[in-house]
Image (cartoon, grey):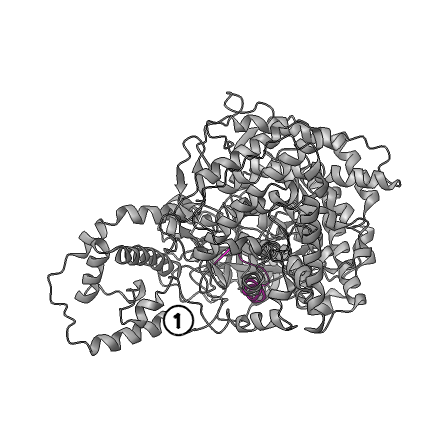
Amino acid sequence: MSEAGGGRGCGSSVPQRAPWSLVAATAAFCLVSATSVWTAGAAPMSREERQKLGNQVLEMFDHAYGNYMEHAYPADELMPLTCRGRVRGQEPSRGDVDDALGKFSLTLIDSLDTLVVLNKTKEFEDAVRKVLRDVNLDNDVVVSVFETNIRVLGGLLGGHSLAIMLKEKGEYMQWYNDELLQMAKQLGYKLLPAFNTTSGLPYPRINLKFGIRKPEARTGTETDTCTACAGTLILEFAALSRFTGATIFEEYARKALDFLWEKRQRSSNLVGVTINIHTGDWVRKDSGVGAGIDSYYEYLLKAYVLLGDDSFLERFNTHYDAIMRYISQPPLLLDVHIHKPMLNARTWMDALLAFFPGLQVLKGDIRPAIETHEMLYQVIKKHNFLPEAFTTDFRVHWAQHPLRPEFAESTYFLYKATGDPYYLEVGKTLIENLNKYARVPCGFAAMKDVRTGSHEDRMDSFFLAEMFKYLYLLFADKEDIIFDIEDYIFTTEAHLLPLWLSTTNQSISKKNTTSDYTELDDSNFDWTCPNTQILFPNDPLYAQSIREPLKNVVDKSCPRGIIRVREESFRSGAKPPLRARDFMATNPEHLEILKKMGAASSIDAEDGLRFMQEMIELSSQQQKEQQLPPRAVQIVSHPFFGRVVLTAGPAQFGLDLSKHKETRGFVASSKPYNGCSELTNPEAVMGKIALIQRGQCMFAEKARNIQNAGAIGGIVIDDNEGSSSDTAPLFQMAGDGKDTDDIKIPMLFLFSKEGSIILDAIREYEEVEVLLSDKAKDRDPDLESEEQPSSENASQDQSAEQVTPSSQEVDLVDQESPEESSLNSEPESSSPADTDNAASVSASEQNSNPMENHETTSLDGECTDLDNQLQEQSETEEDSNPNVSWGKKVQPIDSILADWNEDIEAFEMMEKDEL
């Protein structure tokens, strides 16, 4: 959202029913006036450096956009590792993530208004002509209503908004006659059948050609949708109505929002993650500000800004009060149960909540925004990117990172609100990390694993729609942008809609359905934009003082742990809750505590739910510890120089690369290629890393044969042609049931797609050198200087000195299926034929317990947990209390656990849901 999206004014200076023009003007004034407060707080970044960074962003966008147009268009997205387009149905299915693809040149449409923001008006005009000429919206494809709305409908409307702006200026787009708007209207009508439910909530998917519930449609049987999916429509649909005069779009989107508001949990004023579109029953009753709910809250506030309807602000403030009361545990934002909001629903946070500090800036609540943003930044500094999910003690929960822009968005808004140059340095770090770790020859590749630095063969359209827009605006001065960004509001996909829509075609009745919220603190309505006199009390170091205690939160200290501590109870002498890690089945005291948890007060019951959640996750973590993390195969010879890094499956035998120095050498194919007998070409593999094909014998036998031939390492390539990390989880190679201590060389496994990259390199360059390691290494600058200039496109050549290309890595796990990211362990087998294939455990078997699928790797070293201190305090109190007796009859633990089956299933269902 743009700086104009503040709300009702500084403090309570704007009356409740102020004219919209006054609201928008006051909001803009608030953010602009806040900007000057911090000029004395930290060393300002020079204009020259800001211009240099802005130019760097422009070059990065050219690299991404140019490669999409050259290698992928008219496909929906670019596959940057294999330099080709991703076309629905022509690539292995990635599940729900593919529902964003509709064979409508998604990346081009999503990038339209980014081109204008980055002053690429000629390219914008060319892009609009391509959309009008090539894009077809009548494809027989099932797409996500949510994704199609925010990316395609939003992209068309954003493109139309800036096309008419440029036309009015008189230089560009003089031929334009609302063609993009007509396409948007066509798409809007194609989405309307999704709203044909009794509740007014839309179906999650629709067929662009056949609609809903026809045999040809292949959709319309779904019963559930996420809150964000149903609640993130009002900006695009209302804008479409205001632009065209067709009120039906805004009416449908308002009805969906009204229904969600009516179905909120009345006592907590929270909403769940997923809801039944027919009955309105909450299917998932956990609530947070991340995946599944995030943009619902965002659109309530922004709908007020764009449409001027007070009821949206009242709803937002009601929800925001509940969020800060229950979910916010600064600097953390933890999901809770909507019926028991004092009970945490999970012990980890997802990356999508990184947008929330930016929304808090627009709300005017700066302090918690600074705290949460700083915590997220510390995690990024540890791993270069924000993991898709991480625990409350800052361990990696899901290691993927699809180049999400939400943190950059919050960084931009915090800088606009505070003017603190610290946030310019944060943005500079983001640029450096993208170029160093995500940049590849054909664009930017998503991170498959932030721990190893490996890549996934995807570059989502939102990367061009949002990331470059926010980064460029962060460093740009007002004169660097050809239009006034204050006149527009950002959608959740960062598309620009003009604020003048608030006074256009206002034919929708604004019925206030927000009169029944409970005990709302009126002060919430005062904090709708930054008030510099209150938030920054003559202290230019205000933001720094908030950030400082969080500087070492990831490395040296732990937050309050995974449960909400009842400090008042502890101070009064009560014992802290029993923790799963401390539980002993032979301890009668612990068994008595379990018995109370199952049948005593509501507080004891909450302790029981926490204990069971911890016990499930503890079991999952212990099983994880028995697995080996993925390894890396990095091609370091010319012309790659470390840019290509393949994520490899480890072996349970041979040299442990995590404990020994990496192995570096040239590769050579073994003969026989399966490596199942004595090699006939020992001179070819002597002192090299041998390539072997999977199949026909045990992995350990292959390793012994190449080791006996003098190889210094081995790479096993899958014999299943076409196997790919896009569709299959990694697995680790097991031994043969015998003593494998005799195997001294490292052994790694690659799928067919990834292995073919090495084989193709051998065919083209003959001499190929690789590095086997536990994590990708930084590229050698000396070798890099020997590389010949690339001929990709002119913008890259001109900016070669500004941006250093980075390492390239290949994905091995589908980003949108984090539960499949665990390694598939290969057991022992004695079958003589193709035993290494037969030994693999299927993903479904491996993942039978949904709690066992999450990668949880420590981000830090040892840290002292507050709960341990409280436990010691409790033990001291118990020793001094002669009245404590545990001699009662103890109920068997199996009986106690049986009483909680329903709660365990609830936790498992929550964990099973993907981001």
Q: Residue at horizontal 15%, vertical 73%? A: 883
**Residue 377 seen anywhere in this rendered image of the structure:** yes
Please tell me how crowded label 1 is: few (under 14), some (14-19), or many (20+) other residues with Cα within 10 Å: some
Q: Secondary structure at mark 1?
A: loop
Counting every numbered tag in the picture gives 1
Q: Which residue is mark 1?
A: 865
Q: Position of residue 546 (x, y in %)?
A: 56, 70
**Residue 711 seen anywhere in this rendered image of the structure:** no
Q: Position of residue 396 (x, y in %)?
A: 48, 60
Q: Residue at horizontal 48%, vertical 38%? A: 260
Q: Which residues are magenta?
A: 375-390
Q: Is residue 885 above or below residue 749?
A: below
Q: Nearer the viewer, residue 700 or 80?
A: 80
Mark 1: amino acid: Asp
Quarter of the image holding residue 302?
top right
Q: Is residue 184 above or below residue 600?
A: above
| In-image side of 747 versus 236 (left or right) | left
Q: Nearer the viewer, residue 369 or 318?
A: 318
Q: Position of residue 448 (x, y in %)?
A: 56, 53
| In-image side of 641 versus 897 (left or right) | right
| In-image side of 453 versus 595 (left or right) | right
Is 666 magenta? The answer is no
Q: Residue at horizontal 67%, vertical 36%? A: 239
Query: In the image as oriented, which residue stretches furthest toward the right?
Result: 171
Q: Residue at horizontal 84%, vertical 43%? A: 122
Query: In the image as oriented, which residue stretches furthest toward the top?
Result: 215
Q: Position of residue 600 (x, y in %)?
A: 21, 56
